[in-house]
Image (tube, helix red, strand yellow):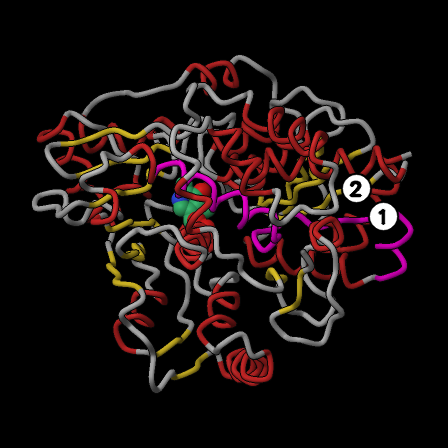
Amino acid sequence: MNFISTRGLTDPVSFSEAVALGLAPDGGLFVPETLPDLSKEIQSWKGCSYEALCFAFFRHFATDIDPSQLKVIIKKSYKNFDSPSRAPLTLLGESLWILELFHGPTLAFKDFALQLLGNLYEHQIERTGQPINVLGATSGDTGAAAIHGLLGKEGVHIFILYPDGRISSLQERQMACTEADNVFPLALDGSFDDTQRVLKDVFGDQDFRKSVNLSAVNSINLARVLAQCVYYIYAYWQLPALVRDETEVVVPTGNFGNILAGWMAQKMGLPFRSFKVATNQNDILHRLFTTGEYQVLDVQPSLAPSMDIQVASNFERFLFYAENSDPQKVRPIMETFKDTGRYDFAEFDSDTFSSSRTDDAEIRSIITKVYRKYGYIADPHTACGLTEWDHPHQQMVLATAHPAKFPETIEECIEISYTHPILELLKSRGIRKHKVASSAEAVKSFISTHIH
Ligand SMILES: *Cc1c(COP(=O)(O)O)cnc(C)c1O
């Protein structure tokens, strides 16, 4: 299987190349050359363990990795999850299913993809003998999940930039209390946008990039989307036979990565009924699916910070399929959007996704009411998916983070101080972070000094 760019100006590449590159050289995102029809095979995956299903799925894509090694990579990736089923399903009332995706090492769904990505990187280093240095910027969960995917791995240094004092103290501790020698959280002055700008400038220096073999960790890596397809298929088989095909899947959404994976699994033959995009008050996707207008507004910080996003980077993959896999159509749309911050889709197929928007007051009220009715504690992101908690019709809501990651909001809503042993352990450790000036030069010099 080869992978092509949504913009069509990059030669097809292998799985390993697509993973190593992240973004395609023409600025597009990698997608499989064709989406395989797995509808028959999916029927034979009933009763598989999470790892066995993941292997059966990835064999269709990671065709340039030796199958016995692929098996080992997958096994390693999910061994640090604290639930034997990896993605357990819980029933509230009669028809509201919660798929808990927060049983990995950083207690958010991003671990499913970033644990695997870390082991894919490691495999590549073993194969090529070339060390790599990973650089990313984070406003929260991604940085922590990336760090935990690469913790202690031979031949990798990981540098994560974040705006000092602007992320929650638990999130900072998840990055700065790992005690691993290959992890460097860099605290920069300024806002998250300033941090992003520094990141872009560092990557813009091609000579530097090559000289230190710098790789990006971000939400657009192909391996992340594929890794996320797996739990949708796994969840399908955990639902009772009678309701499986009737189920609407509700996904708290920011960058459109998680829900895109579910939708792609459906296109490959997973028979879920439909998908619902659940946004917080940053509702660009809700506006898109209700009006056809795709327009960027300013980000408004919310109680569900990992969804505080306006430009949903994975949207381009969906657009590619919506435009019949024609890169000639994708390019002008992305260009217009880049230049003007908006694009109007005249004939948007709004049957594909339904959507909802939840503001902070509603998040609080949902957390309180769901707890009163079902005794279940939902984190603020998951709460955005629970808008129909009162009258659900065969829904499966993806729970994207553990509520203990947001203790202030939980305490405010239900007066319980909720915690998790992983987070308690972090509080007992010293913080190791590096204060660096908010400039590309300072970051480059830090990286050069610390990799030798
Ligand atoms: C990243 C994240 C999201 C949003 O996921 P996307 O793939 O960006 O749509 C939702 N909830 C939590 C807890 C997250 O960390």
The quadrant in which residue 278 appears is bottom left
Please say if 259 is above or below 449: below
What type is the residue that disc 2 sits on?
A: Asn
Residue closer to the observer: 88 or 140? 88
Residue at label 1?
213
Q: Secondary structure at mark 1?
A: loop
| Apparent side of residue 43 relative to residue 369 in the rendered image (left or right) | right
Asked if the magenta segment contains residue 305, the reply would be no
Query: How many numbered marks appear?
Result: 2
Residue range (magenta) = 206-235
| Apparent side of residue 87 relative to residue 325 in the rendered image (left or right) | left
The quadrant in which residue 92 appears is top left
Quadrant of the drawing holding the N terminus: bottom right
Tell me if label 1 and label 2 are in contact, CB under 8 Å. Answer: yes
Q: Which label's residue is closer to the chain start, 1 or 2?
A: 2
Asked if the magenta segment contains residue 227, the reply would be yes
Residue closer to the observer: 252 or 140? 252
Q: Is residue 127 visible?
A: yes
Q: Residues within 10 Å of mark 1 (few under 14, many from 20)?
A: few
Q: Secondary structure at mark 2?
A: strand
Residue at label 2?
133
**Some atom of ligand 1 lies within 8 Å of the CB belonging to the residue at label 2:** no
- Residue at 66% over, 66% down: 4
What type is the residue that disc 1 sits on?
A: Asn
| Apparent side of residue 101 relative to residue 169 in the rendered image (left or right) | left
| Apparent side of residue 379 relative to residue 201 in the rendered image (left or right) | left
